[in-house]
Image (cartoon, rainbow, N blue to C red):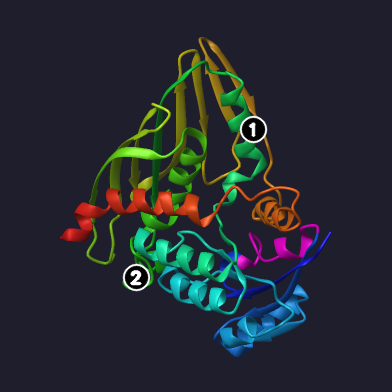
Amino acid sequence: MAHVRWGIIGCGDVTEVKSGPAFQRASGSELVAVMRRTPSLAEDYAKRHGVPRWYDDADGILQSDDIDAVYIATHPNTHREYALRAAAAGKSVYVEKPMAMSEDECRQMQSACDAAGVALWVAYYRRALPRFERIRTLIADGAIGQVRAVNSLRYQTVSSRAWQNQAGLSAGGYFFDAACHTLDYLDSLFGQMTDIAGLATNHSPARAHEDTVAASYRFESGVIGSGTWCFDSDVDVDTTTVVGSEGTISFSISAPEPIHIVRGRRVEQISVDDPPHVHQPLVQTIVDEVNGVGSCPSTGTTAMRTARVMDQILADVRRR
């Protein structure tokens, strides 16, 4: 098996446990170098994680002949820039979600990678996580009969100081950063969304972006869906419920809680633990794809569909 040699641009919090170690632990994968604009922080990360080299400029990663692919883990406002630079340098790209600030930026990234002949993958890691694969299998095997509808609810408090609520770093608030996981996973289950409608508002002047969103949509499979997200609430709820002709399946998007199946008066709980480094199963599919023994389920093409949905849901609030 050929090794995929990685460089990370932006080694912040998400790379500490969720993603960074995955590039060292996936079979056929090797983390060669990391970059962060603050030299002391880049050096500290490299030393703590046993990474051979560190840089404080992305060119150090992009110009290295011993790096095959780049993981971009910066804020969304720089995803396009780094992806275009990586493509121009002949490096394949694995970019954090949300893929970019808009569908248009996503399309530019995909076009650049296509023109350069390099791959583009996106970190919607739930598409490969065992817990979500179990949900997919249950639905496909008819555990709740024919699927009719799906509804998502998420309520929590998010500090106005969180980076997601700061102007310029993202194209939306915590909804834009977190709900895309839900919408992308539902796309993987039921197909592309059509007939998308959304309402969004912001209840706090301290936040630069929306904090409450409601949306409805139809999937190409015929399933209809809806969701309500409020990040200005004193309760903590994260439940997506798939309604079938013979029962329901409910699960959390954000936490490894048990899957609940209700059929009549019968209630079943299924626990599937997440791995220590949740990106690792998806990173493994990337390495397998490079070696011609599989394919990654989260690509620029699939993530662009999620970006289109986000754009349409937030269209009204962005016009104000």
The image shows residue 138 at horizontal and vertical percentages of 61, 25
Secondary structure category for the residue under label 1? helix
Q: How many marks?
A: 2
The image shows residue 165 at horizontal and vertical percentages of 35, 65
Residue 280, quarter of picture: bottom right
Residue 78: mark: none
Q: Which residue is denoted by mark 1 in the rendering?
A: 134
Quadrant of the frame with the N terminus:
bottom right
Look at 61% across and 89% down and name the residue there: 39
Residue 102, quarter of picture: bottom left
Relative placement, left or right, of 18 versus 99 is right
Q: What crowding class fits label 2: few (fewer than 14 Cα within 10 Å), some (14-19), or many (20 or more)?
A: some
Q: Which residue is denoted by mark 2 in the rendering?
A: 166
- Under mark 1, the amino acid is Arg
The image shows residue 42 at horizontal and vertical percentages of 63, 83
Look at 64% across and 67% down and name the residue there: 16
Query: Which residue range is magenta in the image?
Result: 15-27
Q: Is residue 126 above or below residue 85?
A: above
Instruction: Tell me if residue 190 is in the magenta stretch.
Output: no
Secondary structure category for the residue under label 2? loop
Q: How far apart are labels 2 and 1 at the CA level? A: 36 Å
